[in-house]
Amino acid sequence: MFSIKKFKVENKVAKILIIDDEPDILEFLSYNLKKKGFEVDTASSGAEGIRLALEKIPDLIVLDIMMPEMDGIETCQLLRAEPNLKDVLILFLTARGEDYSQLAGFEAGADDYVKKPVSLQVLLSRIQALLRRKIISEQTDNTAIIQINDLIIDNEKHKVFFHHREIFLTKKEFELLYFMASKPGKVFSRDEIYSKVWGNDLIVGERTIDVHIRKLREKLGNNLIKTYKGIGYCLG
C-alpha cells in the first residue's frame, strides 16, 4: 500500500546531515550520498552538528558515536531535546559491536545504527528504510486505519485483519499492536511501551509486555514482531 519516491520526503529531495570527526568518512559519505540524489551537509563535531541541524532541519542525521569532546550519545540527547528536531531520524555510526553501545544509542533516541567500517550499500539500505518509515508514520499519524502489507488495524472499530482474516485481540493486545504499528521498524524500549500502553500510574509485572508480545505472536505469527535483546521490540 505504501510507496516511497526515491530519496524524497514530501516530494522534496531528502536532506541528510553527517556528523563525524573523521574527514575521510565525511568526504566519502558526502560524495556518495550526493551521487545518489541526497542533499548533504557535514559537520566535524557534535556542537557544529547541532548548530547545522537547527539551521537546516534535515530529514536524517548520520551521527558517529566515537567523537572527542562531545560524543555521539551526548550529541543525540541534545538533538532530541530540541523541539524542532524531535522528529528528525538519527542513524548512528559505531565501531563497537557490543550490545551496550547499541542500547545506549537507542536510549539516547537513535532510530538505527550501522557498524564501521561503513558499507555504502548497507548504509543506503538503512537510510531508505528509515525514510520509508518516516513517510508511513506521517501518513498514519492522522488516520484511524493503519495498513502494513497484509496487516490492517482499524482504531475506530477496534478491529484487526491479517491476511484477509479478522484477528480478535484483547484491549491491551490491540493497544500494544496499534502503538507499535504507528511507527513500523522503530525499536520501542520497554519503558516507552509501559508508558504509552499501560501508563505510568499503573504498576504491572515485569513479564507483562513479554506475555502480551507472546500472545500477539500466537495470533499473528512469529515474524511480525522482532525482539532486540536488552533493548525492546519493533514491528515490521
Image (spheres, helix red, strand yellow):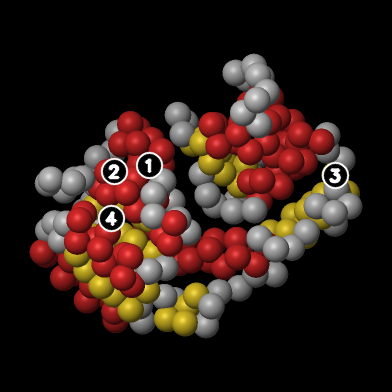
Q: Secondary structure at mark 3?
A: strand
Whole-angstrom CA distance, mark 3 to mark 2, is 40 Å
Is residue 70 in sight in this rendering?
Answer: yes
Disc 3 or 4, which lies upstream in sequence?
4
Q: Nearer the viewer, mark 1 or mark 4?
A: 1
Whole-angstrom CA distance, mark 2 to mark 4, is 9 Å
Whole-angstrom CA distance, mark 2 to mark 1, is 6 Å
> In percent of the image, x 60 and y 61: which residue is there?
137
Q: Amino acid at mark 3?
A: Ile
The x, y position of residue 74, in whole percent, is: 27, 43
Is residue 6 in sight in this rendering?
Answer: no
Q: Residue furthest front?
A: 83
Whole-angstrom CA distance, mark 1 to mark 4, is 12 Å
- Snapshot quadrant of residue 234: top right
Q: What residue is shown with label 2?
A: 73
Q: What residue is shown with label 1?
A: 108
Q: Amino acid at mark 4?
A: Leu
Whole-angstrom CA distance, mark 1 to mark 3, is 35 Å
> In percent of the image, x 25 and y 72: which residue is there?
41
Disc 2 or 4, which lies upstream in sequence?
4
Label 3 crowd bin: few (<14), some (14–19), many (20+), radius 10 Å: some
Q: What residue is shown with label 3?
A: 167
Q: Secondary structure at mark 2?
A: helix
Whether residue 21 sits left or right of residue 112 in the image: it is left
Label 1 crowd bin: few (<14), some (14–19), many (20+), radius 10 Å: some
Question: Against 215, is 70 above or below?
Answer: below
Q: Nearer the viewer, mark 3 or mark 4?
A: 4
Question: Against 38, is 93 above or below?
Answer: above
How many labels were placed on the picture? 4
Q: What residue is shown with label 4?
A: 63
Q: Are marks 2 and 1 in contact (CB under 8 Å)?
A: yes
The x, y position of residue 11, in whole percent, is: 52, 82
